[in-house]
Image (cartoon, helix red, strand yellow):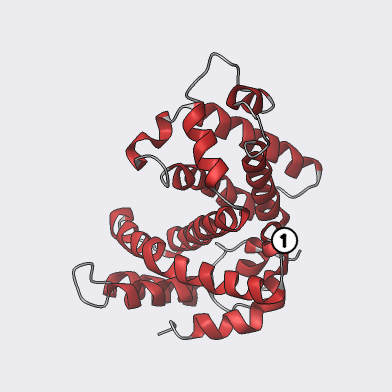
Amino acid sequence: MGSQRVAKLSSTKSARIQRGIRSYEPRGGETAAQASSVAATSIGSFTKTSPFVQCLSSHNVEDALEFLIEFSNRFKFRGASPDDVFKEYDIPEEKNRPFAAFSANAIKKLREKWTEQQQSTESAHAVEDAFSQTIMDILAKTIPRSSARTATKDQFAEAFRQADARHIAGTLLENTITNLIGRVLDAGRGSIPPSRTAEVKKRIREDFAPRLTRAIDRMAREAGIRPSKIPSNIPKWAKRLETFIERYRA
């Protein structure tokens, strides 16, 4: 699906990113607008063949999404036991706090699939980072976020039983968007300290990424696209999404 190297930047784009980061005022009244402008600059043109769209619509994202939706559905079968479900994902019965092991096993399976299909692209790295974050976000709907990494199998079961496919899709897309933009910022920040870039990333995660995700979800609903197929349909909506992103460009 074309070039997926979102972090391969021209000197001009790097300079624009650096200007945006330096002008960001974390305690000002325009933080959302400033961070969104940096995000829009990082994305660049939002066309069917642009690197950002290619990454966001890749099989890597769709595979990870289908994996999580299938995992969630296992808990919704009548009489499904958390131990039995986790056993299918190579988590032994005696391991009652499966966050780390499940995330590692899942990512390993996805990597193996991507390697076999020659889909080990830059988007894969962004999805790997988004995968564990998505699990944590789903768990945080039913337990304190601070407890997510030590969640029990029963707590996993409750959280994923309540999570519908559309919520899972939105959460994974939001985290993937954040991570893709973050990779561009890291590539283009030059000598700007990582701590300064982190402030912009945080605001992008809180504001711009959710807005873009909601725009994608609205288009999916209008088109009657099921959640698991949202990523592969994003190029069809590129023109409309470009209009959305254009609002934020400086």
The residue lying furthest to the right in this view is 117
Residue 207 placement (x, y as % from top left): 38, 68
According to the image, label 1 marks what residue?
A: 229
Work out which residue is located at the far left of the displayed protein and give it: 27
Looking at the picture, tell me which residue is in the foreground, 121 or 58. 58
In the picture, measured across the screen, residue 22 lies left or right of residue 160, that is: left
Residue 2 drawn at (x, y percent): 74, 66
Is residue 35 found left or right of 67 in the rendered image?
Answer: left
Return the residue found at the far top. 94
- Vertical relation: 3 (above or below) 194: below
Q: In which image quadrant can residue 140 be found? A: top left
SS at mark 1 in the image: helix
Residue 48 in sight here: no
For label 1, count other residues whose C-alpha is less than 10 Å away and answer few (under 14), some (14-19) or many (20+): some
Point out the image quarter for the N terminus. Answer: bottom right
Residue shown at 63% from the left, 35% from the top:
106
For the question of whether residue 200 can be seen, the reply is yes
Report which quarter residue 109 is drawn in: top right
Q: Disc 1 marks which amino acid?
A: Lys
Q: How many marks?
A: 1
Question: Residue 174: x percent and y percent?
Answer: 51, 60
Which residue is painted at 39% across and 63% down in the image? 189
Q: Position of residue 237 (x, y in %)?
A: 67, 78
- Nearer the observer, 31 or 143: 143
Instruction: Examine the rendered structure and indicate whether residue 172 appears above or below residue 190.
Output: above
Q: Answer above or below: position of 142 versus 200.
A: above
Query: What residue is drawn where x is 71% and y is 62%?
Result: 226
Residue found at x 64% / y 69%: 53
- Considering every residue shown, the one lying at the far front of the view is 78
Which image quarter is the C terminus in? bottom left
